[in-house]
Amino acid sequence: MRLFDDQQLILLCLFVGLAVFFGLEFWLKKRRARRGDRQWRSERPQPFGRRGFGGREAEASRVPDAADQLRIVMGADFTVQPLLNKGETRLFRELDRLVSELNPEWRVMAQVSLGEILRSRDAEAYRCINAKRVDLLLVDEDCRPRHVVEYQGSGHHQGTAAARDAIKKEALRRAGIGYHEVLAGHTTPGDLKRLMERLMERPAGLWDEAVGDKDVPVERPF
């Protein structure tokens, strides 16, 4: 006498298969949860001495993905912010005019990230300059960076500004890009014109720490 007919045998096999499948799925979830907990513990910020500065991997893992970033942006308000302040804008206009007259193929760009114009095989050194910006950048006809012009306002040298400038100067110097400062209240349009005439007659890599001529009171300084 048969204990099960064919239909009952099929149903029994289906039931056993489902039970095995759900049991295996439950076991895999538990395993993934334990593995994730171990990973979180291993990436958790550690005190100095255990893993150096610790927590860098954990910080990177907490960066929102693209979907989360979109959700955050959709829930926020944004407003327009001028690219340059008034002093920088006046300098940009005058510099752009002078460059166009001296060499129409050159261009002036504003607020350029050093990470876009410099490269280094030293990843740590690159991170030090990647997010830093320069006020104005002169590029030649091949869009190759040639000279940087920084606007130093009256309250510029405060806090860590001098240290940040030193980092930018050294990185630019090592890349062969000229660095020049326009001093608010001191540099006149005549000073700027003489500087541009000098720079655009010579190869890149010039190194003028600052431009200023206090003996020319006729022109309004930047």
Image: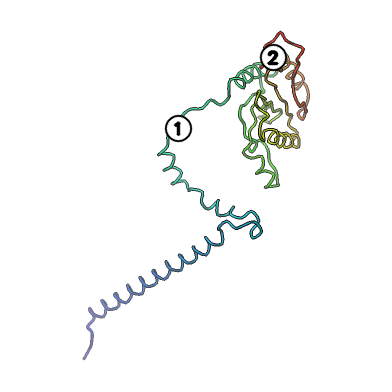
Q: In the rendered view of the protein, which quadrant contains the N terminus?
A: bottom left
Q: Which residue is mark 2?
A: 189
Name the side, left or right, on which 212 lies relative to 88.
right
Residues marked 2 and 1 touching at CB (< 8 Å):
no
How many numbered markers are drawn?
Answer: 2
Name which of mark 2 and mark 1 comes first in the sequence: 1
Q: Position of residue 72 (x, y in %)?
A: 43, 42
Q: Secondary structure at mark 2?
A: helix
Residue 116, picture quadrant: top right
- Residue nearest the viewer, comparing 218 with 113: 218
Q: Identity of the amino acid at label 2?
A: Pro
Q: Position of residue 71 (x, y in %)?
A: 41, 43
Crowding near the residue tagged with mark 1, few <14, some 14–19, many ≥20 C-alpha atoms within 10 Å: few
Q: How is the image coloured?
A: rainbow
Name the side, left or right, on which 56 lies relative to 204.
left
Q: Which residue is mark 1?
A: 78
Q: Identity of the amino acid at label 1?
A: Phe
Picture residue at 64% right of the left edge, 24% below the top: 108
- Answer above or below: position of 199 versus 15: above
Mark number for residue 197?
Answer: none
- Residue nearest the viewer, comparing 17 with 150: 150
Residue 167, picture quadrant: top right
Q: In the rendered view of the protein, which quadrant contains the C terminus?
A: top right
Q: Position of residue 102 (x, y in %)?
A: 70, 17
Picture residue at 58% right of the left edge, 20% below the top: 86
